[in-house]
Amino acid sequence: MNTATLDQSPRVLVVETDETLAQHVSSDLRESGYETAIAVDYATGIRQAKEFQPSLIVIDRMLAGESGLTLCNYLRTGGARMPVLLMMARDLVDDRIACLEAGADDYFLKPYRTEEFLRLVRLYLKPDTSTSEQLRFTDLVLDLATRRAIRQERVIDLTMKEFELLKCLMEHPREVLTREQILESVWGYDFMGESNVIEVYIRYLRLKIEDDGEKRLIQTVRGVGYVLREA
């Protein structure tokens, strides 16, 4: 879905039923150099995700008659790999877990704050300056250009945060990383996260890279963090 070419501005789709808020968000994005489209309901969001081919999607968790979580999950199930940001009214652990389990990469809170929102968008749409094309550990390969993992010739689609987490681990093979180190490296901004948020990502990564019963590579170091190594 993410097919923005090098000579055009990144495209951002805003799925928001509050048209005043949607216009405010869209205006802030355009002033920052992004091309935008607005969808005011669930069905339009699905259609625009296909037709507009956005580089990033912003979804309000509370859509009229539908859940933004459901829309996010639908897009991920359909193979969408661009970053998805959820706008949420609460910042409780259960809300964060629901956000991650729906396939969203991150979230920001209401009331809407322009600078906080744009900082998050820039974080996810920053150019990839990686010079190395691939990272390898045993039979696991991480392609930095496509942001996909490959294991036993099986291509594995990753969300942005899953990719960043796996990249962090693969850049430090056999080195135990604390939860604090992982939060700082993967999130890269003031994220007041709890360990169970990281555990959700680890669980989903394991499900993806061990889908065919392959040997476990991401090991838990109880009370400390995680390490990429063979058991």
Image (tube, rainbow, N blue to C red):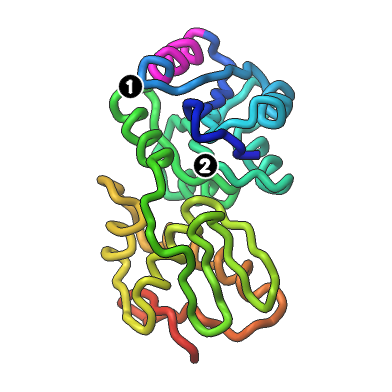
Q: Residue furthest front?
A: 7
Q: Which residue lies furthest to the top in this view?
A: 20
Residue 124 position within the rendered picture, expressed as x and y whole percent measured from the top left: 42, 41
Is residue 199 visible in the rendered image? The answer is no
**Residue at the location (48% across, 59% down)?**
144
**Residue at the location (49% across, 37% down)?**
85
**Residue at the location (36% across, 51% down)?**
129
Question: Which secondary structure type mostly characterizes the magenta part of the structure?
Answer: helix
Tag 2: amino acid: Pro
Q: Which residue lies furthest to the bottom in this view?
A: 231
- Give the magenta part as a residue range: 20-29
Determine crowd level at label 1: few under 14, some 14-19, many 20+ residues with C-alpha closer than 10 A: few
Magenta-span inclusion, residue 22:
yes
Residue 228 position within the rendered picture, expressed as x and y whole percent measured from the top left: 43, 79
- State the SS at label 1: helix
Name the residue beneath numbered marker 1. Answer: 114
Instruction: Determine whether 90 is above or below 37 in the image.
Output: below
**Residue at the location (64% across, 20% down)?**
64
- State the SS at label 2: loop
Mark pair 2, 1: CA separation: 19 Å
Magenta-span inclusion, residue 62:
no
Residue 16 position within the rendered picture, expressed as x and y whole percent measured from the top left: 56, 20
Is residue 215 visible in the rendered image? The answer is yes
Residue 83's disc is 2
Residue 89 figure quarter: top left
Determine crowd level at label 2: few under 14, some 14-19, many 20+ residues with C-alpha closer than 10 A: many
Which of the image's four quarters has the N terminus?
A: top right
Residue 13 figure quarter: top right
